[in-house]
Structure formats: structure tokens, C-alpha cells
Amino acid sequence: MEKDIGKISKNDTTDIIVRVDDFGGNTGLTIREFVTSDRYTGFTKSGVRILARDFQKFKEMIDSIPESDMNASGSEGSPKKSDYSSRDAERKTPAAKKKVSEELPDY
């Protein structure tokens, strides 16, 4: 069973596809990049799969995001790599990883 839910254009050659499917006998939600180019057309490895048993938790997490958080900086587009550099360096330490996991709610 495959049921496409929708797609979001990422750039000229890549879309993000959301679908409900049955992979390996397990139903789930798949969010994956789909590339259309001269060299390759199809799904990439980039994406995530949420099993049906975890879908309600995933939905609650998404629904908990205030729309105002999506408009926080007032700028359009993707963040630059430099925006993440210091934050990523901090997250690589074991203490930082523990702190991040302690701050996240369990759904």
C-alpha cells in the first residue's frame, strides 16, 4: 500500500514527499526527498520513516509547535551553515547531549 499525502518543493530538482506506505510489512509515514535529474530520478536516502505505532506521538509533537515559532526571525529561506557552527560544536560534547535530551518532553 502506498498513499501519497503531499509534496513540498525543496529546489528545482528536489521535492519532499510525504506518504503512508507499507515497508517490510510495517505501515508508517515516510517523509523523503525525491530527486529528478539527468543522472537519477527517484527517492534518496535522505528522509525519515515514522512507524504507525509512533505516529500519534509524532503528530502530538508537530501539533505542539506554535505557528509563531515558524516566524521567529522574520527572514525567509534556509539558515546559513555558519548559523549552526557554534551551536553544533556545543552539542557534540557528552554533557551537551545529555542536557539536550533532558530538556525534551517525552511524548
Image (cartoon, grey):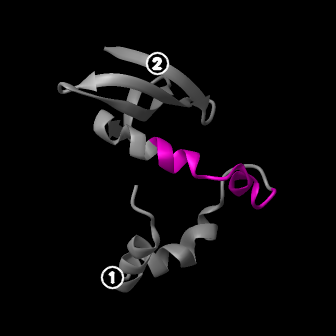
Q: Earlier in the sequence, mark 1 or mark 2?
A: 2
Q: Quadrant of the C terminus?
A: bottom left
Instruction: Give the label on residue 94, or none.
Output: 1
Among all residues in the image, which is located at the extreme right? Answer: 74
Q: Is residue 6 magenta?
A: no
The picture places residue 88, in percent across and down from the top left corner, at 49, 73
Looking at the image, which residue is at 81% across and 57% down? Answer: 74
Q: Amino acid at mark 1?
A: Pro
Residue 40 seen in the figure: no
Which residue occupies 27% across, 22% down? 22
Q: CA distance from mark 1 to mark 2?
A: 39 Å
Identify the secondary structure beneath mark 1. helix
Direction from residue 52 to residue 17 in the image, left or right: right
The image shows residue 97 at horizontal and vertical percentages of: 38, 76
In the image, 13 versus 98, the foreground residue is 98
On screen, 3 above or below 37?
above
1 and 2 marks in contact (CB < 8 Å): no
Which quadrant of the figure has residue 87? bottom right
Choose top left, top right, bottom left or bottom right for residue 39: top left
The residue where tag 2 is placed is 4
Magenta region: 59-74
Residue at image point 35% right, 38% down: 49
Is residue 36 visible in this depiction of the protein? yes
> With 70 as the anchor, is 7 left or right in this view?
left
